[in-house]
Amino acid sequence: MRVWHITRTLYGGAGIYAQRLSEALQHAGVDSRVLSADSDGAHGTAQPRAVSRAAPRFVTRVVRSMSHRLTTAPYHSLMCAERYRGEQMPAKGDIIHLHSLTGWMGLRGLNALIPEGSPVFWTAHDLWPLSGGCILYAGCDSYRGDCGGCPILSSGVKGWAKTELRMKEKFIRDKMVRPVANSRWMASHIIESRVFRNSKQVPVIPPIIDPVYFSTEIEDIRAKLHIAPGKKVLALGARAVTDRYKGIPEFLAALASRSKLAEQFVVLLFGEGELELPTNLDVRALGRLNSAEEIAQVYYSSDVFVSPSVMETFGMALAEAQACGTPVAAFDVGGVRDAVSEECAKYLVASGDMEGLLEAVVKLTENKLPTGGHWRVNRDWAWENFEASVIAGRQKSVYSSL
């Protein structure tokens, strides 16, 4: 049995999920590979190239241009027409496991990539596998019906989403695609969707936590960053700190507005991009961190990791922080509860309740160990739920259900 994990990129949540899952399956004795647009050929990955002629390339450029100009939120169309080939490609009988295709492949390329009769699984990391083109869930449930009157499409092209949904529904039906969810929240949306309406039970396979975060030898970098011993340290970060859905500027502004509270904290901020930072906050902008080791050091050196994100289908950073022993506070959105242990769940607050989130942070930093020092969470929970061999075993069972 050979498994092909197909994902647009190896970076970001879906790409990291696919690559870690493939490597875990390899260790479990499965011939597993990743097909990605930005593969470097390492760790069982392969990179296909576009082989289409001028007309399909032109169509793809037009469709992508329209999806940027005629929408108010991220959107990806199945009408992209390019096809892809490579030295290593799926063969008849291989299992195809789709992850994130947005910004890359359309229906023509996807159909050409999947051999006739191959079993197809699709892990939903966002709303796009269920929708008429939108990627981020913002409260619209039209994916349960026909995506008519899409709120993010310009007037005059709102029927585009309806057409996309019907194309996706046909693809899923023809290929007998089996859905997989990265959280219970995502599974509930899959079951409610039009395209997977015949799915009664959806397996939930959460992301794998890199073993680096479970290490007992993570370096505490407070001294390197010249943080005074009495300061409380918050970690805050995302792939891009400017991502409007992550809520980072709003959280920093809320903390800065409470001057007495602000002076108690040092904020370790990581991620691409630059923000205009409040002048009364001690924020150490660390920029993009290029390794799990660097990120683990930030988690481990912090008293609390905070997630003010307004939407997460899982919440990988929350799970990673707890694997390092760091308690977390977050908005209770999407699949976040699957990423948070029972002992930290009491520090989840309603989405948008910034004052409530600040209060949760204060309560967490006031917790003390009996021997002194700040409270740390039980790391065993993260190991039992997100360690590589555990997840590989669960995914193998899903494949075996065929």
Image (cartoon, rainbow, N blue to C red):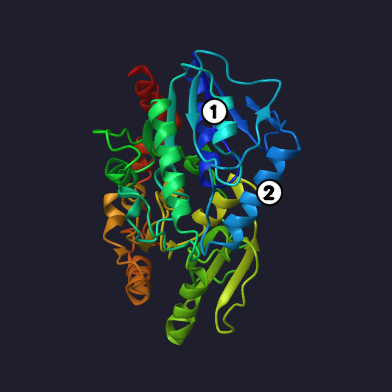
Residue 11: percent from the left, percent from the top? 60, 44
Residue 361: percent from the left, percent from the top? 37, 69
Q: Which mark is residue 330?
A: none
Residue 88: percent from the left, percent from the top? 66, 20
Q: Residue furthest front?
A: 156
Say which of 184 and 304 sits in front. 184
Residue 389 visible at all: no
Quarter of the C terminus within the rendering:
top left
Residue 390: percent from the left, percent from the top? 38, 29
Q: Earlier in the sequence, mark 2 or mark 1?
A: 2
Residue 348 visible at all: yes
Label 2 – label 1 distance at C-alpha: 19 Å
Q: Residue at x 30, y 59 (%)?
A: 370
Above or below, 319 against 384 in this view is below
Secondary structure of the residue carrying tag 1 is: helix
Rendering quarter of residue 356: bottom left
Secondary structure of the residue carrying tag 2 is: helix
Q: Residue tagged by mark 1?
A: 111
Q: Is residue 197 left or right of residue 257?
A: left
Mark 2 belongs to which amino acid? Arg
Q: Residue tagged by mark 2?
A: 61
Mark 1 belongs to which amino acid? Asn
